[in-house]
Amino acid sequence: MSKKPMYRQIADTIQQWIAQGELAPGDALPTEAELREQFGVSRVTVRQALKQLTELNVIESIQGSGSYVRQEKVNYDIYQLTSLYEKVTDPAAETHSDILAFEVIKASSELAERLNLVEGALVYYVKRVRFIRQIAVTLEETWMPLALFPDLSYAVMQGSKYHYIEEVKQLVIDRSEQEIIPVLPSAQVVEALGIDPAKPIIEKVSRGFLQDGTVFEFSRNFFKSDDYKFTLVARRSR
């Protein structure tokens, strides 16, 4: 019989499940109640086991959802303008978006300046949560000119807007100008991503340009720092 404390035996067993492929990255662990019943232990013991696995970066807990096998961070290459689906290296990793807001608004003076429009021009405002393997990883707010995309729809924004722009509208995307800022999450970000309100996250503010110089979007993205790593290549001038 193992001399290890019971919570460590439970943690070891869960790691074996992962190593043997019974649980894959992004999969939900059994609930605390199921683990208590399976191992015949108290809630405190189960929570000690989950705490150990969290500290080892084996699992992550999502507030109000449960515990999941931690997956490899999404590599956000700042120099590559790609969609969320294209950034995910595992082709089996399911991605989708939940739309929280989809409406047409009049551009304020600040927004009009960002989009190179006249004040009061009609603009789509879309707020959506991006998911990888059913785990929320990004909250995105996007503003796009209605005149440029008169047929933009709720269904389009549930998928890839880049696919819509390039394949449906046959427009050529040239570049994105981005600012990366560490911030504390707002209440809406905490609720959308189920994160610790005291833990800093990454905010990315960007403008997207078509080949002819037209601004096609202004967006603000909030990333869970646990799920993303940002990379760039710096070359020394000669």
Image (cartoon, rainbow, N blue to C red):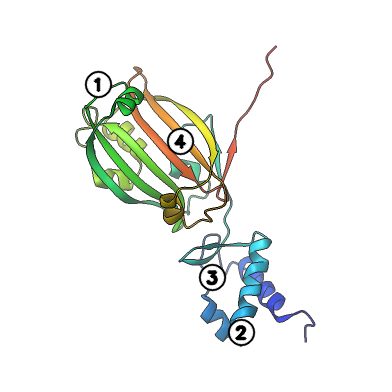
Q: Position of residue 49 (x, y in %)?
A: 65, 73
How many numbered marks, from 0 up? 4
Q: Mark 3 points at which residue?
A: 29
Q: Which amino acid does label 3 sit on?
A: Leu
Q: Disc 4 residue type?
A: Thr
Q: Residue at x 49, y 39 (%)?
A: 203
**How many angstroms separate mark 1 from mark 4 (CA)?**
29 Å
Q: What element carries label 2?
A: loop
> In the image, what residue occupies the spot 27% across and 34% down?
168
Amino acid type shown at disc 2? Ser
Q: Splitting the image into 4 quarters, where does residue 175 fall? A: top left
Cα–Cα span, label 4 and label 2: 47 Å
Q: Do the residues labelled 2 and 1 touch (CB within 8 Å)?
A: no
| Number of the front mark, 3 or 4 | 3
Report the side of 210 relative to 87 (left or right). left
Mark 1 crowdedness (10 Å alpha carbons): few <14, some 14-19, many ≥20: some
Residue receiving disc 1: 118
Mark 4 closeness class: few <14, some 14–19, many ≥20 residues within 10 Å:
few
Q: Earlier in the sequence, mark 4 or mark 2?
A: 2
- The front one of 223 and 107 is 107
Check disc 4 and report the residue beneath it: 82
Q: Can residue 9 be seen in this view?
A: yes
Q: Which of marks 2 and 1 is nearer the N terminus?
A: 2
